[in-house]
């Protein structure tokens, strides 16, 4: 996104833009939610990342060993050293199942699964195709996690999936969270809790896991509360890339301390961070990175010109919550504003509804894959959708 934004704005005689990527394949990560239920195929969630690199941008396929901010140098595994004047870090976040005892033991991807990785979602798909029922537990280890609503969406889709297979009566679904409710925002929690009750999904809150007892098929928290399972779908601890730790740029979870309004890292004025790799109190979601990119582009240009950076990013996030049966919710919020009711993107017109289930929202959710590949990743502005919310939070600022 940043390369696509900046390539037309930086004079080519003065600046070169280089992308360093250790992965050949770029994944549409929101699609991992649908892969276990055979809603998406494997081909629909991955593409060759190189095809999205704009003309005029250098592309290096290599792993970064370490970043040396004092020297303004990046050490690569094969290519050697790359120097920089400005560095934008977008290393994301990854699951760390080894952080919880018993998670990635001998039953990992046998009856304990994640769906936050391509490999995990694919393995879970194969399991669900032949699973005959029992106790399904959907579990969040700790916050923050990538796409905070995804575990709830998984629970809703599981309910629909087993109904369609004519075996919902054979499956007991339990949603287990360390939070005191279904979501991080109270207003959304109220709506989502109702849906859990409506679908007959049990809820266990304030569960701070200590270990997975894979021999006896149960998870145990620090208060010795136990939840039994036959099939455990867990969201392990999410952490920033190990590169951030090696480079001394991160906090305890390897997230980069970053100014939440300018996206400039706190320790290095010529290093900026975007997306899930930051410690910002915003959702780790694709829409957030998209909104950040528009503001960060302006701040990169201001930094080059020696001007004061705009303190403009407000944590704006909006995301569809798939509630199954061809319906979805849409929530829109920022650092300080609770998810609001109303319509989106046009007040009183919509066509999308906020905090209400609708088939139109579901269509928007399913259309997002096309928008991702054809607009978001290419840095194309989405009409009528701005990077910041209005003060009232009921419509977006143009």
Image (cartoon, rainbow, N blue to C red):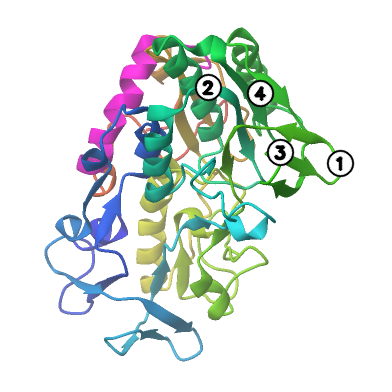
* Magenta residue span: 354-375
User: Mark 1 falls on what kind of element?
Assistant: loop
Residue on which the image places disc 2: 133
- As drawn, 325 above or below 1: above
Q: Disc 1 or disc 3, which is closer to the eye?
A: 3
Q: Residues within 10 Å of mark 3 (few under 14, many from 20)?
A: some
Residue 19 at x, y percent in the picture = 27, 70
For the N terminus, which image quadrant? Answer: bottom left
In the displayed structure, 32 sits above or below 279; it is above
The secondary element bearing badge 3 is classed as strand
Query: Which is the main secondary structure of the residues drawn in magenta?
Result: helix
Query: Can the viewer see residue 381?
Result: no
Q: Nearer the viewer, residue 215 or 346?
A: 215
State yes or no: residue 364 in magenta: yes
Q: Which type of secondary structure does the marked residue at label 2 adopt?
A: loop
Q: Provide the residue designation for mark 3.
A: 218
Question: From mark 4 to mark 3, how far is it between C-alphas?
Answer: 26 Å
Residue ranking furthest to the left: 55
Residue drawn where x is 61% and y is 8% of the image: 198
**In this rendering, position of residue 26 left or right of residue 134:** left
The residue wearing badge 1 is 224
- At which x and y percent is residue 133? 53, 22
Q: Position of residue 88 (x, y in %)?
A: 40, 68
Q: Which residue is mark 4?
A: 189
Do the residues under discs 4 and 2 have CB atoms within 8 angstroms?
Answer: no
Point 11% across, 63% down: residue: 55
Give the mark, 2 or 3, whose residue is nearer the N terminus. Answer: 2
């Amino acid at each position: 996104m940043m390369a696509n934004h900046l390539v037309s704005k930086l004079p080519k005689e003065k600046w070169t833009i280089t992308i360093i990527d250790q992965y050949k394949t770029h994944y549409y990560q929101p699609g991992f939610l649908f892969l276990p239920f055979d809603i998406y195929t494997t081909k629909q969630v991955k593409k060759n990342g190189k095809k999205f690199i704009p003309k005029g941008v250098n592309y290096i396929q290599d792993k970064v060993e370490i970043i040396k901010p004092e020297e303004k140098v990046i050490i690569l595994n094969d290519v050697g050293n790359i120097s920089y004047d400005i560095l934008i870090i977008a290393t994301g976040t990854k699951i760390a199942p080894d952080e919880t005892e018993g998670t990635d033991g001998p039953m990992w991807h046998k009856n304990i699964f994640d769906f936050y990785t391509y490999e995990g979602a694919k393995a879970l798909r194969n399991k669900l195709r032949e699973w005959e029922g029992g106790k399904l537990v959907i579990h969040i280890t700790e916050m923050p996690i990538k796409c905070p609503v995804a575990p709830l969406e998984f629970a809703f889709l599981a309910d629909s999936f087993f109904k369609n297979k004519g075996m919902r009566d054979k499956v007991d679904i339990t949603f287990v969270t360390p939070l005191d409710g279904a979501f991080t925002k109270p207003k959304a929690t109220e709506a989502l809790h109702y849906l859990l009750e409506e679908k007959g999904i049990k809820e266990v809150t304030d569960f701070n896991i200590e270990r997975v007892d894979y021999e006896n098929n149960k998870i145990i928290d620090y208060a010795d509360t136990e939840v039994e399972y036959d099939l455990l779908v867990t969201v392990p601890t999410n952490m920033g890339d190990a590169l951030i730790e090696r480079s001394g740029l991160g906090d305890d979870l390897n997230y980069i301390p970053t100014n939440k309004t300018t996206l400039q890292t706190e320790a290095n004025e010529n290093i900026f961070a975007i997306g899930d790799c930051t410690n910002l109190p915003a959702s780790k979601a694709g829409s957030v990175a998209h909104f950040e990119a528009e503001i960060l582009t302006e701040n990169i240009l201001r930094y080059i010109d020696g001007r004061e950076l705009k303190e403009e990013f407000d944590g704006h996030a909006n995301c569809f919550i798939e509630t199954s049966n061809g319906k979805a919710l849409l929530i829109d919020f920022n650092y300080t504003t609770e998810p609001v009711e109303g319509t989106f993107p046009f007040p009183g017109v919509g066509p999308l509804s906020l905090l209400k289930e609708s088939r139109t929202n579901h269509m928007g959710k399913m259309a997002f894959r096309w928008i991702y590949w054809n607009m978001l990743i290419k840095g194309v502005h989405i009409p009528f959708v701005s990077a910041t919310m209005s003060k009232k939070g009921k419509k977006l600022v143009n």
